[in-house]
């Protein structure tokens, strides 16, 4: 639901990072989205295209890397990825877990075509 | 093809303002709670019950967030506490800068505790730090005992769970133990209160807990 606001935040950061004369050369913005970040990748991609259509960067798109939710059990140190939101260790059933990844919402890099 | 490496958080601007809000609250010794839930879970009713019990013991202020209307601010204002209504005009959550602006219109003299009632939504508000000390998620029995599993991020990011409308649990076929266990599976550190704003059950326990938090300042 808040993907439009997120897309605007991404655009702002891209505008701060790319000199204005190079804006038309932006092709791809790589971002990392954790499965626990509350962001729907398809919806974010759609919103980003919409707000970009009014800018010099209209040829750019998002490359979204989805980051899995990975936890480490503080009791048996088993590290695992989970899908079903059962926040218990599959090995020892402990709930004493530490989240290692899954909350990411980060811009990694911006790709530009070479300008002459 | 050339590449500019950035490695920046998308919500960094919000996080920076939230941090500024947090320092502001810390300097003044104000304990701040961010109340989150789906629409109609009972956030405002819980707030009213809390104000009724606590307003003579401590100074409390309230920031209300809604998509439209100042109905909630009107309800809260009856208890004689400073209140500001944020109308998001479609926005599905509060952001740190809205809180920063609202603080300018709030009389915080002597205030020890600030309630921020977020926009009713069990998804988006979990992503936005407002500068609060804790998030309190309210889930009512009529929403069903499976909701913690369906909306895990909110329960993961909260410190307190209030299960509201416990008087309606039998009619809503909601099993309180199942609900509680589902929430604790996602976040074992959750402090859980069971409540009914209709019968008044659980309000005193919650207010005792708030008194201790308020006395400690942070």
Image (cartoon, coloured by chain):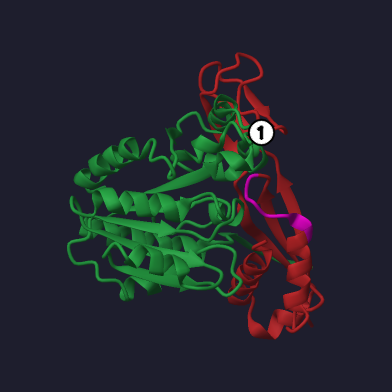
Q: Which residue is mark 1?
A: A85
Indicate the secondary structure of the residue bearing disc 1.
loop
Residue A30 in view (yes/no): yes
> Magenta region, mostly helix, strand or loop?
loop
Residue B105 rendering spot, x and y as whole percentages: 32, 76
Residue A8 rendering spot, x and y as whole percentages: 64, 72
The hue in which chain B appears in the rendered picture of the protein: green
Describe residue B111's horizontal placement relative to residue B15 as left or right.
left
Residue A108 rendering spot, x and y as whole percentages: 65, 58
Describe residue A97's horizontal placement relative to residue A81 as left or right.
left
Q: Residue at x 69, y 31 (%)?
A: A82
Residue A112 in view (yes/no): no
The hue in which chain A appears in the rendered picture of the protein: red
Closer to the camera in the image, A4 or B213 = B213
Residue furthest to the right in view is A59
Q: Does the magenta portion include A39?
A: yes
Q: Would you place residue B136 above or below residue B148 in this image? A: below
Q: Residues within 10 Å of mark 1 (few under 14, many from 20)?
A: some
Q: Residue at x 38, y 72 (%)?
A: B102
Q: From which residue to which does the magenta span run?
A: A36-42
Q: Residue at x 56, y 20 (%)?
A: A77
Closer to the camera in the image, B202 or A116 = B202
Q: Chain of mark 1?
A: A
Q: Would you place residue B44 above or below residue B209 in this image? A: below
Q: Does the magenta portion include A38?
A: yes
Residue A101 rendering spot, x and y as whole percentages: 61, 40
């Amino acid at each position: 639901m808040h993907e439009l606001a997120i897309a605007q935040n991404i655009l702002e950061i891209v505008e701060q990072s790319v000199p204005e004369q190079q804006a038309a050369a932006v092709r791809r913005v790589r971002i990392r989205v954790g499965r626990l970040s509350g962001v729907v990748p398809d919806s974010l991609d759609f919103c980003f295209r919409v707000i970009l259509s009014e800018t010099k960067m209209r040829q750019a798109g998002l490359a979204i890397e989805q980051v899995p939710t990975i936890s480490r059990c503080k009791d048996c140190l088993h590290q695992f990825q989970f899908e079903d939101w059962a926040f218990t260790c599959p090995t020892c059933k402990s709930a004493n877990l530490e989240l290692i990844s899954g909350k990411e919402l980060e811009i990694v890099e911006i790709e530009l075509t070479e300008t002459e | 093809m050339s590449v500019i490496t950035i490695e920046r958080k998308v919500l960094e601007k919000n996080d920076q303002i939230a941090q500024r809000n947090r320092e502001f609250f810390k300097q003044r010794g104000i304990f701040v709670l961010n109340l989150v839930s789906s629409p109609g879970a009972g956030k405002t009713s819980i707030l009213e019950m809390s104000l009724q019990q606590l307003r003579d013991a401590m100074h409390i202020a309230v920031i209300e967030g809604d998509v439209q209307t100042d109905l909630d601010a009107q309800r809260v204002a009856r208890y004689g506490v400073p209140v500001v209504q944020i109308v998001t005009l479609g926005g599905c959550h509060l952001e740190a800068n809205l809180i920063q602006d609202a603080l300018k219109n709030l009389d915080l003299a002597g205030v020890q505790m600030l309630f921020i009632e977020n926009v009713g939504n069990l998804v988006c508000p979990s992503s936005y730090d407002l500068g609060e000390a804790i998030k309190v998620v309210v889930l009512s029995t009529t929403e069903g005992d499976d909701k913690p599993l369906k909306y895990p991020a909110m329960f993961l990011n909260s410190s307190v769970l209030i299960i509201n409308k416990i008087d309606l649990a039998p009619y809503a076929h909601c099993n309180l133990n199942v609900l509680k266990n589902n929430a604790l599976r996602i976040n074992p550190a959750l402090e859980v209160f069971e409540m009914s704003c209709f019968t008044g059950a659980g309000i005193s326990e919650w207010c005792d807990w708030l008194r201790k938090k308020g006395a400690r300042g942070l």
